[in-house]
Amino acid sequence: MAALITCSIRRSRLRYLCDLLFKTHGFVCNYQVNVSRQNGHITMDLQSFMNMPWRQAPGRTLTLELWKECRYSCPQFKDKKEVGMHSSFLMFLWNFFNRIPESPLKMRLRFFMAFNKMVPEKIRRMSPVLASAYKHTPQPGDTVVEGGGFPGDFTIYASKKVGAAGHVYVFEPNPINFSHLKRHVEAFKCTNVTLIPKGLWSHDCEKKMTGRGVESHLQGDGTIDVKLASIDSEMSRLGVTKVDFIKMDIEGAEPEALQGAVKILGTNAAKLAIASYHDFEGHETRTGIEKMLTPLGYKFVVDFPERENIYAWKE
């Protein structure tokens, strides 16, 4: 029986299935307990899943039948055969695509794969820009703040959506990533974009970064010195008071960045798309994001399990 679903998944996707079982059948589980984790992924099979520390709903038992009922709502959990056919192939495709040198042509291919209905949905839903615009879309005239601009797909998308009356402010701290981002913005003639060579944090400071491309992230022993700023301080320097949309995908620094945006979030009803699938210094970012949003009057939902985001808004 254990061989049914042996696969490697992100911890956030395991959480998605646990949330689904809670919402539909009342089962509660501390999924962080007794789960081996390597390189941001968890090796999970049916037997270890069933043996997790579940608190069962009154009068109900977690059975194979309930598992079968729920698993097809979570695309990361499939039969072993399907995992081999789909998940492995998609991961290969994703890694291969990321190794292609950055260029305007590659950017056009990103948009084709994200928005063309001819592309299989499994491939389309791997797109970061599609995940960021899944619940809320920038509107004409909006002011957008983006944390983590590389490679520029959401930047260009938002630029075209807000039009000449709107503006997009983009933070990207990695120097190499910033150069690619700038080249793409210029190639697509996005004149309503301001590029800021800094990362986001709770306050203005300097830190070290490691990695390149989409894997670039803050790390204490990193080799790249970068400047960080809070949204509140940088928007104040730029004279910006109105913000309508905030997108962040900054490799686990999202909770800290939200702490640095309390003033903007308190005085605006900005819609948010915040990546919540990262770990940072051993902690999941989702919990920290949720704790920040509730006191600020935000409603939110967690969705898009392929690239989990917290989508938030004020009513």
Image: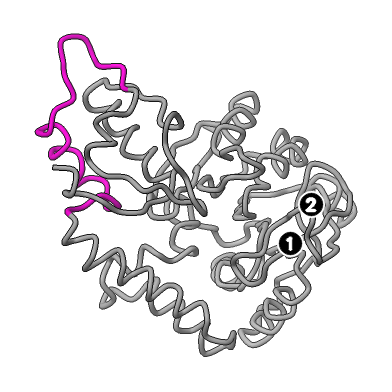
Q: Residue at x 64, y 88 (%)?
A: 187
Label at residue 220: 2
In the image, is 62 to the left or to the right of 99? left
In the rendered image, which residue does mark 1 sit on? 171
Looking at the image, how many numbered discs can be counted on the residues? 2
Can residue 56 be found in the magenta stretch? yes
34 vs 266, nearest the viewer: 34
Indicate the quadrant containing the N terminus: top left, top right, bottom left or bottom right. Answer: top left
The spot of residue 184 in percent (x, y) is 64, 82
Q: Residue at x 64, y 31 (%)?
A: 292
Can residue 64 be found in the magenta stretch? yes
Which residue type does callout 2 highlight? Gly
Q: Earlier in the sequence, mark 1 or mark 2?
A: 1
What secondary structure is found at the residue carrying circle 2? loop
Does residue 40 lie above or below 298 as drawn?
below
Which residue type does callout 1 highlight? Phe
Task: Tell me which segment is drawn in magenta.
Answer: 54-79
In the image, is 176 to the left or to the right of 125? right
Q: Name the residue at the top extreme.
A: 58
Q: Residue at x 44, y 80 (%)?
A: 96
Q: Residue at x 71, y 70 (%)?
A: 193
Give the Cα separation between the discs numbered 1 and 2. 20 Å
